[in-house]
Image (spheres, rainbow, N blue to C red):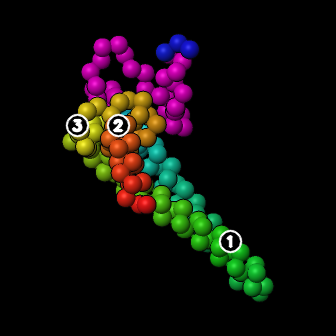
Amino acid sequence: MPESQTTTKFAFRDIPAYQEKKGEEYMNHDQKEHFRKLLLAWKRELMEEVDRTVSHMKDEAANFPDPADRASQEEEFSLELRTRDRERKLIKKIDSTLELLESDDYGYCDACGVDIGVRRLEARPTATLCVDCKTLAEIKERQTSI
């Protein structure tokens, strides 16, 4: 498969994947702007989902006379709230990633300092470790959790 076809697989909503140009500098202005747009769009979508959940819970809240119906609704709300809590944490991570962009530290591994890589950042825009360091961290985590 030609290179141009393999690099466009990931796109967040209506933001196409970044197309690297031959010989361009890593984390140049265009790349930073691309990831800023990507992160802001992701954050906006998460915030909209929070708003939808609040509206849904207000609209659907009912005091069912049947205990089974009440329990089902409470379980549904509990699952939604857990999901929103995970998304709240993700929003915080997106905010800290945007700060890294502002300080010109975005795109570099926290552990070893090498380039994380545009393709990896397309797949996980909040990544702070290169593939090698992330793999080592996961191996260490597995070894210590046994």
Name the residue nearer the viewer: 123 or 15.
123
Which amino acid is tagged 2?
Asp
Q: Which residue is mark 2?
A: 132
- Residue 92 lies in the magenta-colored region: no
* Image quadrant where residue 107 sits: top left
Q: Residue at x 56, y 14 (%)?
A: 1
Residue 48 visible in the picture: yes
Where residue 71 sits: x, y (%)? 70, 79
Residue 120 falls left or right of residue 6: left
Where residue 66 sits: x, y (%)? 78, 85
Q: Which residue is mark 1?
A: 60
Would you place residue 49 above or below residue 29 in this image? below
Where residue 30 sits: x, y (%)? 33, 26
Which amino acid is tagged 1?
Glu
Q: Where does the magenta region start and end?
A: 4-32
Judging from the image, what secondary structure is the residue with disc 3 in?
A: loop
Residue 101 falls left or right of residue 138: left
Observer-side mark, 1 or 3, equals 3
* Image quadrant where residue 74 sits: bottom right
Name which of mark 3 and mark 2 comes first in the sequence: 3
Q: Residue at x 23, y 39 (%)?
A: 112
Where residue 129 sits: x, y (%)? 32, 42
Observer-side mark, 1 or 2, equals 2
Name the residue nearer the viewer: 103 or 114.
114
Residue 102 visible in the picture: no
Would you place residue 3 above or below residue 45 in this image? above
Question: Residue 113, which numbered label?
Answer: 3
